[in-house]
Amino acid sequence: MASVRDSFIRLCLKPSVECDLPGRLRLRFGRFEMLPRAALPYLHYIEDILGMLAGVREVRVNARIGTILILYDAQMTSSAAILHWVDAVVEEGLRMAREKDWSKAVDEAELVHLARRRLTMLLPRAGKENQEAGSAAAPAKEGL
């Protein structure tokens, strides 16, 4: 049953790219409205989590329409690296959810601290992939 739940959550949190310009990425989460209502109070953490990635300057979440605008330094990261980070965050969240019943075990602040610590451990791997993805990214165009 957990694999069905995990697949459903992956489906809801799989973004599509609406706009991809050097330094500007808009993602749409087309099925975010299917997420359980219990997840909605935690959407504000998206900005914090995406901001953990080196080069991400600003994150704007529009929960009403399910989009996220990410402004980033194209010399430090790329849209491919950001998309990889989104996938890594979802997978780590699913791993954490399978470990125990968090609703009974800890308060929200403790859970946030644990999640940040675990995601920070993923950053060096994501950082290396950022550099690889960034080197393959198209150079920024003048005048955009």
Image (cartoon, grey):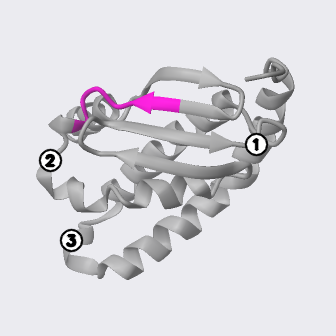
Distance between mark 2 and mark 1 Cα atoms: 33 Å
Distance between mark 3 and mark 1 Cα atoms: 37 Å
Q: Which residues are magenta?
A: 26-32
Is 136 located above or below residue 108 in the figure? above
Residue 32 in the image, given as x and y percentages of width and height: 25, 36
What is the three-letter code of the residue carrying label 1?
Asp
Is 113 located above or below residue 30 in the figure? below
Q: Pointer 1: what residue?
A: 73
Residue drawn at 86 percent across, 26 percent down? 135
Q: Residue furthest left?
A: 37
Residue 120 in the image, given as x and y percentages of width and height: 64, 62
Q: Is residue 33 left or right of residue 121?
A: left
What is the three-letter code of the residue carrying label 2?
Pro
Q: Is residue 95 left or right of residue 143?
A: left
Residue 98 in the image, given as x and y percentages of width and height: 32, 54
Residue drawn at 43 percent across, 53 percent down? 46
What is the three-letter code of the residue carrying label 3?
Ser
Q: Residues within 10 Å of mark 1 (few under 14, many from 20)?
A: some
Q: Secondary structure at mark 3?
A: helix
Residue drawn at 21 percent across, 32 percent down? 4
Q: Residues within 10 Å of mark 3 (few under 14, many from 20)?
A: few
Identify the mark nearer the N-term, 2 or 1. Answer: 2
Q: Secondary structure at mark 2?
A: loop
Distance between mark 2 and mark 3 Cα atoms: 14 Å
Q: Quadrant of residue 119?
A: bottom right
Q: Contact (CB < 8 A) between labels 2 and 1?
A: no
Q: Nearer the viewer, residue 121 or 31?
A: 31
